[in-house]
């Protein structure tokens, strides 16, 4: 009876939790709140690349930045029928229930869905009768599936029109804009279709409590009267305000429940002339990238919140180091601002939680598309592209645990934790240093891109992890992992948590390469402060790796933490080989 009661109680509590979520989010003064009027902190991930490809996510940005150009490249090397097959497979595999389950398990409570309008309706140029709308079920069914997966995980879904009819900005890649055709702002018919699409979506999801709200238009960036082509110097934006009000009116005809999120011109940053609010359930959504992480970077938005008594939501950010993620989220939540990160997965990238593996064959296609030369065989191209769609599946991606760790655990825990389980005796690979904040798990002189003074490479090798530590792939035959910590500099350090089965004296050898100068390291046992130092003489080349005996440390049974100090940098380090004497 006791067991049955326990299970019943657990079931009731689960049902209560689901039921408590099954309520609309709403605006209350300067906050987004739940059904009980309590601040609801949106912690979301944007599904960039699923419905709308951007070239940089596929490493085609230098020659095919928009989805239309990417599709044209695929069609040219194969044929139209295959291009359609490719995109069906892409959409089927890029986001599945497994992806949503994983996001929830990592700590995310919401998803922002970037939508391409052409999955829901035809472009105006293809409508048989001007002024009409042909509806396409593909997009709606994709949203239906995502609603179902979010509901099962107690998550909110925010719909984001990322590519509006005609394109909403001169930054072509983010909205699949074609300058040869009338943009959203140049075409009353594109605006009418945008309003109609939002009304159709609102009709379908008006009573769906899993929907957290409607993000009307992603990052408008258009010059109306100013000189900046992306609208950053506009002193008034009546065209944007009017369209937002028209969309809102159409939504409210069928849906009075959901929050409406509005973004400013200049990639969601210029709200001049767009406010004040025209609806009692409206939220200001801004985006931030590559900025400093102090309050000054959001002060203008805080001022808007106070002036207009409206909530703020940071609807898109990312593309930076883990430390920047940690500091930015800490800043936002300190000021009661929810957020959505970007993106969940990309090809050959470490900045998100998932990396899509790039094959050598795909690199062959990239080389041809960019440089020309011998055209790859059609069957080769088809097989290569379909393999990429297979690599999109969650189970085929590389999971980067350091990314969600920075976004969630590190917000409330300043302790480093092991990145991998290191059982001694054995090799401890240098790149498997502990997870944690900068100056907690590691120290590196350049650890994030946050000054707004141009792009800063926090990880010079762009591989393996997303911290400030510089990592590169190596060809060392004795390095089974295939990566090393490189570009080392004086004063940097790394922490390693190792598990030791028995007390004893342990010898430590270091595998390293150095082509420039003699380096020096110190290995410190944190528990008692004991340490050993050794010089790392020149090996003569970055391709020549040597082992050197660093000395011995007395380790205790259980967990031990070793701090690797880079006293004199200029070398690459592959691993520590720790063996009992």
Image (cartoon, rainbow, N blue to C red):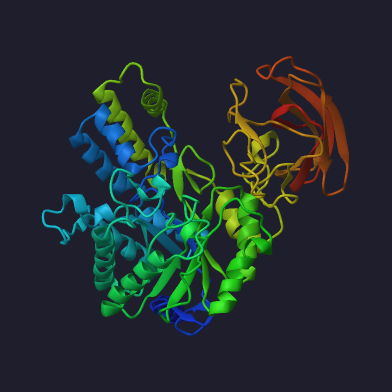
Q: Looking at this view, is 62 or 575 the one in front?
A: 62
Compared to residue 101, the image places residue 514 above or below, namely above
**Image quarter (top left, top right, bottom left or bottom right) of the C terminus:** top right
Count of numbered badges drawn on the protein: 0
**In the figure, is residue 439 to the left or right of 231?**
right
Q: Looking at this view, is 366 or 44 the one in front?
A: 366
State which quadrant residue 477 falls in.
Answer: top right
- The reply to whether residue 157 is visible in this rendering is no
Q: For the point 62% across and 59% down, which residue is it?
A: 328
| Residue extending farthest left | 128
Q: For the point 39% across and 24% down, which residue is it?
A: 364
| Residue extending farthest bottom | 36
Q: Position of residue 220 (x, y in %)?
A: 42, 57
Q: Position of residue 419 (x, y in %)?
A: 63, 46
Q: Looking at this view, is 312 or 528 the one in front?
A: 312
Q: Looking at this view, is 226 or 190 the one in front?
A: 226
**In the figure, is residue 39 to the left or right of 182?**
right
Q: Position of residue 351 (x, y in %)?
A: 54, 45
Q: For the point 34% across and 57% down, which residue is it?
A: 185
- The reply to whether residue 183 is visible in this rendering is yes
Q: Position of residue 336 (x, y in %)?
A: 59, 72
**Image quarter (top left, top right, bottom left or bottom right) of the N terminus:** bottom left
């Amino acid at each position: 009876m006791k067991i049955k009661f326990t299970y019943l109680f657990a079931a009731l509590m689960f049902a209560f939790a689901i039921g408590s979520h099954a309520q609309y989010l709403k605006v209350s003064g300067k906050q987004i709140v739940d059904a009980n009027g309590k601040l609801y902190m949106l912690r979301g991930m944007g599904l960039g690349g699923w419905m709308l490809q951007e070239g940089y996510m596929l490493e085609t940005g230098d020659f095919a930045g928009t989805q239309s150009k990417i599709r044209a490249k695929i069609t040219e090397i194969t044929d139209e029928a295959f291009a359609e097959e490719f995109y069906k497979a892409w959409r089927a595999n890029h986001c599945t229930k497994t992806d949503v389950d994983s996001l929830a398990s990592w700590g995310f409570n919401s998803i922002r869905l970037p939508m391409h309008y052409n999955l829901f309706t035809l472009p105006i140029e293809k409508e048989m009768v001007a002024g009409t709308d042909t509806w396409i079920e593909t997009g709606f069914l994709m949203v239906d599936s995502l609603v179902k997966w979010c509901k099962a995980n107690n998550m909110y879904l925010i719909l984001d029109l990322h590519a509006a009819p005609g394109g909403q900005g001169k930054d072509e890649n983010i909205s699949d804009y074609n300058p040869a055709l009338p943009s959203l702002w140049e075409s009353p018919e594109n605006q009418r279709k945008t309003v109609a699409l939002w009304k159709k979506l609102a009709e379908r999801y008006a009573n769906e409590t899993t929907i957290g709200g409607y993000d009307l238009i992603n990052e408008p960036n258009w010059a109306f009267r100013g000189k900046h082509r992306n609208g950053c110097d506009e002193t008034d934006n009546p065209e944007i305000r009017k369209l937002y009000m028209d969309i809102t009116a159409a939504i409210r005809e069928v849906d009075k429940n959901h929050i409406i999120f509005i973004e400013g011109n200049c990639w969601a940053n210029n709200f001049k002339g767009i406010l004040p609010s025209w609806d009692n359930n409206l939220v200001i959504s801004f985006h931030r990238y590559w900025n400093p992480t102090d309050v000054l970077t959001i002060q203008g938005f805080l001022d808007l919140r106070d002036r207009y008594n409206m909530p703020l939501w940071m609807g898109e950010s990312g593309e930076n180091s883990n430390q920047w993620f940690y500091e930015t989220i800490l800043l936002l939540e300190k000021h009661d601002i929810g957020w959505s990160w970007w993106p969940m997965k990309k090809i050959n990238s470490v900045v998100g939680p998932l990396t899509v593996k790039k094959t050598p064959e795909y690199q062959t296609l990239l080389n041809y598309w960019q440089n020309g030369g011998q055209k790859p065989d059609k069957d080769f191209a088809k097989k290569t592209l379909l393999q990429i769609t297979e690599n999109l599946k969650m189970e085929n991606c590389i999971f980067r645990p350091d990314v969600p760790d920075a976004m969630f655990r590190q917000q409330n825990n300043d302790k480093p934790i092991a990145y991998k389980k290191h059982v001694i005796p054995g090799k401890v690979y240098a790149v498997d240093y502990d997870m944690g904040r900068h100056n907690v798990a590691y120290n590196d002189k350049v650890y994030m891109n946050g000054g707004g003074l141009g792009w800063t490479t926090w990880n010079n090798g762009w591989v393996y992890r997303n911290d400030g530590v510089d990592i590169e792939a190596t060809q060392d035959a004795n390095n089974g992992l295939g990566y090393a910590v490189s570009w080392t500099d004086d004063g940097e350090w790394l922490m390693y948590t190792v598990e030791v089965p028995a007390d004893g004296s342990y010898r430590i050898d270091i595998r390293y390469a150095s082509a420039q100068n003699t380096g020096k390291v110190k290995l410190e046992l944190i528990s008692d402060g004991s340490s050993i130092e050794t010089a790392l003489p020149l090996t003569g080349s970055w391709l020549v790796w040597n082992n050197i005996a660093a000395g011995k440390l007395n380790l205790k049974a259980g967990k031990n933490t070793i701090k690797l100090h880079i006293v004199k940098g200029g070398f690459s380090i592959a691993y520590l080989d720790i063996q009992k004497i």
